[in-house]
Amino acid sequence: MTRYIIRRLIAMPFLLLGIITIAFFISHNTRGDPLISIIGERQMENPDVVAAAKARWGLDKSLPEQYAIYVGNLTTGDFGTSLRTKRPVAQDLLDRLPATLELVIAAMLAGSLTGIVLGVIAARFRDSGIDHLARLWALIGSSTPVFWSGLILLYVFSVALGWLPGPGRLNARTLPPETITGFLTIDSLLSGNLQLFRESLYHLILPALVLGWTVMGIVSRLVRVSMLDVLSQDYIVAARARGARELRVLFNHALRNAMIPTLTIIGFTFAYLITGAVLTETIFSWPGIGSYAVDAARNLDYPAIMGVTIVGGMAFLLSNLLTDIAYAFADPRIRLR
Amino acid sequence: MTKLYRRSHFARWRAAALLCISLTAAASFPALASAEDKPLVIVRDIDINSLDPARAWCDTCQIYLSNVYETLIGLGTDNKSLVPRLATKWEANADQSQFTFTLDPDAKFSDGSPVEAKDVKWSMERLKNVKGDASFMMDAVRSIEAKDAKTVVVTLTGPNSEFLNILTAPYTGVANSVEASANGAAAGEDAATADKGEAWFLAHSAGSGPYMLAEYKPGDVLRFKANPNYKRSAVAIGDIVIKHTKDAVAQAQMLQSGGADIAMQIDPDTAKTISGGELSVETVPSYNFLYVALSPGAKDGGKLASKEVRQAIGYALDYDGIIEFTVGGQGKKIPVAIPNGFPGTDGLPEPKQDLAKAKELMAKAGAADGFEINATFPNMNAYGVDLSLLIQKVQQDLDKINVKLKLTPVEFSVWRDQVRGDGIPLTTVFFAPDYYGSAQYVQYFGMMEGTPWWKRAGGATDASITNAKTAELLTKVLAAGDAEKPAIYKEIAQTMIDDRIIIPVVSPDLVLAHAKSVTGLRYSACCNLLMNELGLK
């Protein structure tokens, strides 16, 4: 397995270069003017200002030249400067990635665990009231638009009941802890501030639930289908006939075999949410990669678009690798070579 | 057996659930923070493109710069009169081409160093030479002389009676030249390439305003702290946070839940949902407006070359209906592309729908059967108005005179590309003031050679687009004294109305939503929000 992992890791830079090349030329050939991020409407009519901006941002060079410069800079770790925030893209990404990871990990944990449990229960009590309820809950989760559920839950739990805080990673009046990892829950613990830890955890609940509900819907339906298939197998009947306890049958015998397709979808969803949790980030004012990506795309902020592409590409490549490794653990018959 | 097992199984689940509930209760989640001893929180969409006074250009930038970098002249609470700021007094020569400013002897930057004439000269020259968005404000400047430490003389290339108004714009704020220069900023003629100060300005401030930059995280937060060296007026609130909250509904929820004290971009529909005895919601007229623009010179815009057709379009629009449809009646009609209340707008007739006249004009132009034109528009919300709703209403209105609009929503970047390329025969877009003064609107919307909308309308290829009278009157007003200006601006406004290239349709009201404990909140024409006027009860 080690050789397999090393081989996949070696291939990653080449795959990333392919992603970068395709994304670079597609983004630079879309309709629209990147100067929108740099120059206001009035000064777009001023040739001196336009020329100065193009020279400053290298937009006066040919596309192949821009590509060569960009790739050359990447080899030194320079992702360029965002046309919109005017800060190094690497700095923007480092500021925002922990926020996204903190949210996505919490949502994936909540969504995957509840989804798996719900899927198992639904399969175990097939066609009963419990099954129908579980399926309805999953259906609502996977089909309700996040912007709607987010706003409704915010209204109910934050405005009407006052049980949970409003948008943001922390109360806007609170100073964040010193940045160590960028994960507020971890940094507040590392700084020994339990009050801040609780506040950051508290702020994580609603967005993680909203995002996790969608994940739960997808996972539970998949687990249910896989479990139904597995539960009808002879070895399950045999296990029950031998007097194995139901929990052992469900989780040790059935679930483990039903997890392969679920692992694929969990891995894919995790990678997707790194750049795809846009609506949740917008509604909850969560300063993550998703909202950064959308702003970059809307403003044709090429360096930022490329930075997000690299992060997204890396997320997919790594999650694929981790999913493959997880297969081997879930099913010992699978050998990675 | 199975039943027994199942009962035992659920009993364990119940126990686990009870344990979770107990732990949750024991965790004693923190209560929502109270406003006491905490910063004042403002929620808005932080649209910052820079914090460098010579490069910034956005609504939030106006707020930031107004509160961090003082200008020579301020705008009074009536949003019209000029009041002293860094300059305690000023005088103009007879033809308004040279201005002398005397600086406040007590003015200090946040690092404690005095504000001197050299800083004013450096800041103005930098604004002009870095060729940023606001550099046009210094286009008229020929030279700036620091006569002594506290006297600045600005000489213009010609008369400009609006120059003092320009100096109220936050973009003309004065920065500490020594500190900024030491961190890469340059002001010389080669500043467009030599200046490297922007990155420093994103993390530091060097102004003499009531506040200093405490922290800026793009797309997240902008924190201010009071400048201890600011003595012009008392600053009641030590720390102010602008929290990035893009969505109007989320802004309202933050306000209602006590997470914010001021919500800045609540649209009228959302305002109706805000309730609570501790909150105040009021609407005030704004100086922002949305307009329909016609471009005869655009590809397939030929029929619009007829002034009668353009006038017919103006008469066909249901202005009251547009205001009702787009902002629920919370807006004002606007006769010309100059904000209501600005010089020259008093007494102008309000636009109104007259379908009979519109049809008569269409017939006179030989276009009674109508025509179809492209109407590409930016698919966005501006100042609480959804542009797609606005243009759908325009489409309905123009259908009544057989002008069919082919609506094409696009991203703003694509719209800008198109409007400057082949052109767009009919579109809708928005405008907001940079300072109190009407010349800026004439120079942007007037059908004079070189203005942005003259180019877009096809002025370069169609001589009939150019209105020589507008240019002539503008020259006259820029050399005129205060007493004559309103009448001349009114004449200019009439020429702009007659051209019917720009047809303003609504000036949306501004919703001021805040906790009742906040005092001193008002809308400023130059600066949006002046934080040093805020207080807490």
Image (tube, coloured by chain):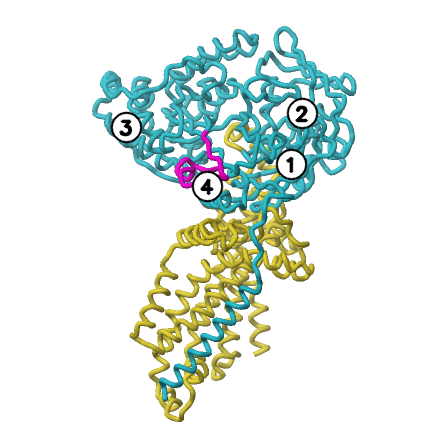
Compared across the picture, whether A250 is left or right of B238 comes to: left
Q: Which residues are magenta?
A: B265-283
Same chain assignment for discs 4 and 3: yes
Q: Which residue is mark 1?
A: B237
* Residue A261 shows up from this direction: yes
Spot occupied by residue A255 in the image (x, y as percentages of width and height): 43, 79
| Earlier residue among tags 2 and 4 | 2
- For mark 3, give the secondary structure: helix
Task: Spot the yellow chain and give its letter.
Answer: A
Give the CA separation, mark 3 to mark 2.
Answer: 47 Å
Q: Amino acid at mark 3?
A: Leu
Give yes or no for contact between labels 3 and 2 (Cβ–Cβ under 8 Å): no
Same chain assignment for discs 2 and 1: yes
Q: Which residue is mark 4?
A: B276
* Residue A310 shows up from this direction: no
Is residue B180 rendered magenta in the image? no
Give the CA separation, mark 4 to mark 1.
Answer: 24 Å
Chain of the residue where label 1 is placed in the rendered structure: B
Q: Residues within 10 Å of mark 4 (few under 14, many from 20)?
A: few
